[in-house]
Amino acid sequence: MKLKTDEGGWNPYFAGALLGLLAIISVFATTKLMGKTNYLGASTTFVRAAGILEKTVAAAHVGSNEYFTKTKVVVDWQFMLVIGIVLGSFISSILDKSFQLESVPPTWKRRFGPSINKRAVGAIAGGIIAMIGARLADGCPSGHGLSGMMQLSASSFVALVMFFAVGALVARIVYGRIS
Amino acid sequence: MNTDQWLGLVTGVLFGFLLQKGRVLRFEKQIGALLLKDMTIVKFMLSTILVGMVGILLLSSFEIITLSHKPMNLGAVLIGGAFFGAGWAIMGFCPGTSLGALGEGRWHALFAIIGMVAGAALYAELYPFFKTTVLAWKDFGKIGLQEALGVPLWVIVPCFWAGTISLFLWIERKGL
């Protein structure tokens, strides 16, 4: 087994195991420093970001919305975690020279052509559907897939099976014709 | 920034660094996994779970940390999970990886991020509807697999490890 992949990355088993260690250190650190155990996650931050943006044009509406009130529109631990992901990925990709500006992913291009507009419509539509799903299921591949599975949450097993099963089905329909 | 925010930022930088090093952020990797052609993200996620599970369950058994199960609200998890899977396959990113992909220069991830923020805003408007329908159907509460199955943790964890390692061996034999 190789420690480096052909693409210059780290062996995924090794990098994944290190993230497992980070997850353990993180629950310990949040418990000690914040007085409450926090688990890695990402999708709730999109609700807070939506609330912050909506507040600039319709503050009263956000204030009276039950879901925004329940979620609390604040820049909290997870919000900064999500911003940190952008920074960490940037640092890593600059260090190993894998940073690359890309406007349309190669797989998408082979199936739908080089149009940026088409890609934008697909990504925005997919994003809307996915986020409604993530909020209903109460988690994404981070919150359910990693944090929930680590705790052996019953709901996370069901969620992860649905993510992959329906994802595989739709991916076959959308991209299946490319080899 | 307060302590919470600094802690989140530092953890996030390390999180993003490892995601990028594992090469799991790319559109190609996500769609490759869903088309069952490239199992990089499956190897990565399951390795994280195997390691994290042992530490987190031990810390919680010594009452150093508290577990935080998400509710087993069956209709919501099934329907929400299906919606998420469909959207994930179309955009080729999940919430965490979209931000990471942006960091490594795949700027088209911005479209996915815009879509997800819009989806979150839409969900906030639809919440009263979901609350009286899907979310009200059947909630089994915040339960772990041990309660759902009636099997103790010290049986589940070794079985989970054995099953996952077998899957890894199969993936490597197939060269995926």
Image (cartoon, rainbow, N blue to C red):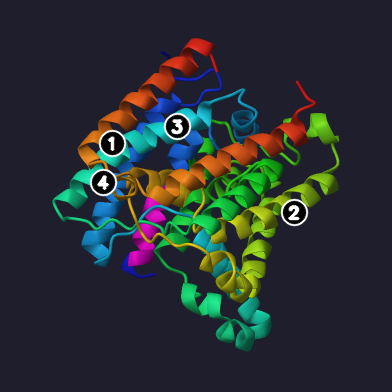
**Foreground tag (1 vs 2):** 1
Q: Image check: B145 left or right of B73?
A: left
The residue to which callout 1 is attached is: B156
Which residue is at a point 67% across and 45% down the rendered structure image? Answer: B86
| Disc 4 from disc 2: Cα separation | 36 Å
Q: Which residue is mark 2?
A: A125
Three-letter amino acid code of the residue under disc 1: Ile
Is label 1 in contact with label 2 (beta carbons under 8 Å)? no
- Residue B44's tag is 3
Q: What's the magenta region?
A: B4-14
Residue ID at (16%, 55%): B63
Principal SS element in the magenta part? helix
Given residues B138 and A179, the one toward you in this image is B138
Between marks 2 and 3, how big is the CA–CA gap? 27 Å
Residue at (47%, 59%) from the top-left corner? B73
In the image, what residue type sits under mark 4?
A: Ile
Mark 1 and mark 3, same subunit? Answer: yes
Residue B124 coordinates in the image, percent (x, y): 61, 72
Report if residue B107 is visible in the image: no
The disc placed on residue B40 is none
Residue A64: x and y, percent?
A: 57, 86
